[in-house]
Amino acid sequence: MISFDSLPAHPDPLVGASHPPLEHEVRSRDDLILNGWTDRRLAAAVARGELFHLRRGWYIDGAERAALHPEERHRAHVIAVARDSTGGAVMSHTSAAVLWRLPLYRIRCAAVHMTMPAARRVSSSPDVRRHAGPLPAADVVIVDGIRCTSLSRTVFDLLCVLPGEAAVSVADAAERQMARRLREWDLDAVAAWRLELGRRLAEADGRRGVRQARWVAAFADGRAQLPGESVSRLQLHRLGFAAPELQVPVAGPDGRTFFVDFELGDVRCFGEFDGKEKYFDEAMRSGRTVEQVIFDEKRREDWIRGASQNRFARWGMEHIGTPAALGRRLASFGVRPPDAGAQGRR
């Protein structure tokens, strides 16, 4: 194992994102009626935005839902469908992903996805899409009291169908989930996870999307701690940069250690993906003002540049939508891929 002290502690935005627990916030019409509501009052509350109508007979507080990440909004929908569900179908695909707290980069979840054994008759409804396919017992688990596909089955299903950026984000997050053990990074767990996913992929010859899934599984790196970092890795690869080192420790003043998201060794440059949470999330600011965070970041960056004699580039979510957009941002810092002809890679 590698000590997790060598990795920076970034809170996962999908873990503990709702408070009180989301399961308590999703309420049925019957429960609300028992607590003094009427159908007229429910309709008026939905019209005013005080309640959000998840599906027939299920509601959530409007303000609570508005504060949720998109993945958690979908999880509320999943909870409502699960409470209505009967039969052998289990949550799968993006709907299993949100139960596993996997990120869904730029994926809009309009319907809940469920899978049932191939022999069953498949029918869908306006807000539920049902899939038929093999569903061995080992692929079915319970998360938050809801039956869903296992983590490896969920990741396998998603890598075959998601766009590349979202697929890499899922693969990185799943590997991180398997490898992170309190304050240590479990290399044996990483190896076991890759072996299990590789076995599924090896047995999937001919399945639609399996070629992409195999590439993404090989490309995955759980040290990428946020979807923005995962997508940055993919765009850097597409631009022609060598695979960067991730979460690189740099000795700081007074015995401190700074960590940098990326080291682009082929062009002697450090890189940071700057999510807005660093500046605007009060928990991440640890009581500091936005101005203090910016000042501290500047001092940290100056030290790292001076100590390493490397260049230093920063980018955000608005710069990673395409390889060209990230390339333009890096060029503004004087950073370009060593082989410009390598652009246009996968």
Image: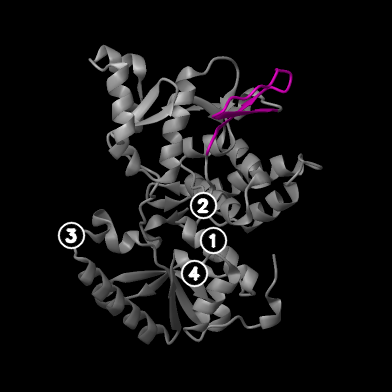
Circle 4 — which element?
helix
Q: Please tell me how many numbered marks the rendered image carries.
A: 4
**Rendering coords of residue 94 (x, y %):** 55, 39
The one of 59 and 233 positioned closer to us in this rendering: 59
The kind of residue tagged 1 is Val
Q: CA distance from mark 2 to mark 3?
A: 29 Å
Of circles 4 and 1, the one toward us is 4
**Rendering coords of residue 260 (x, y %):** 41, 70
**Do the numbered discs 1 and 2 sit on residues whose CB atoms are within 8 Å?**
yes
Q: Is residue 317 visible?
A: yes
| Other residues around mark 1 within 10 Å, as few (<14) / some (14–19) / many (≥20) | many
Q: CA distance from mark 4 to mark 1?
A: 10 Å
Tell me the residue that label 2 is attached to: 105
The one of 48 and 226 positioned closer to us in this rendering: 48
Residue drawn at point x = 19 percent, y = 65 percent = 289
Residue drawn at point x = 49 percent, y = 77 percent = 329
Circle 1 — which element?
helix
Q: Quadrant of residue 135?
A: top right
Residue range of the region highlighted in magenta in the rendering: 110-132
Circle 3 — which element?
loop
The kind of residue tagged 3 is Gly
Of circles 2 and 3, the one toward us is 2
Residue lying at the far right of the rendered structure? 206
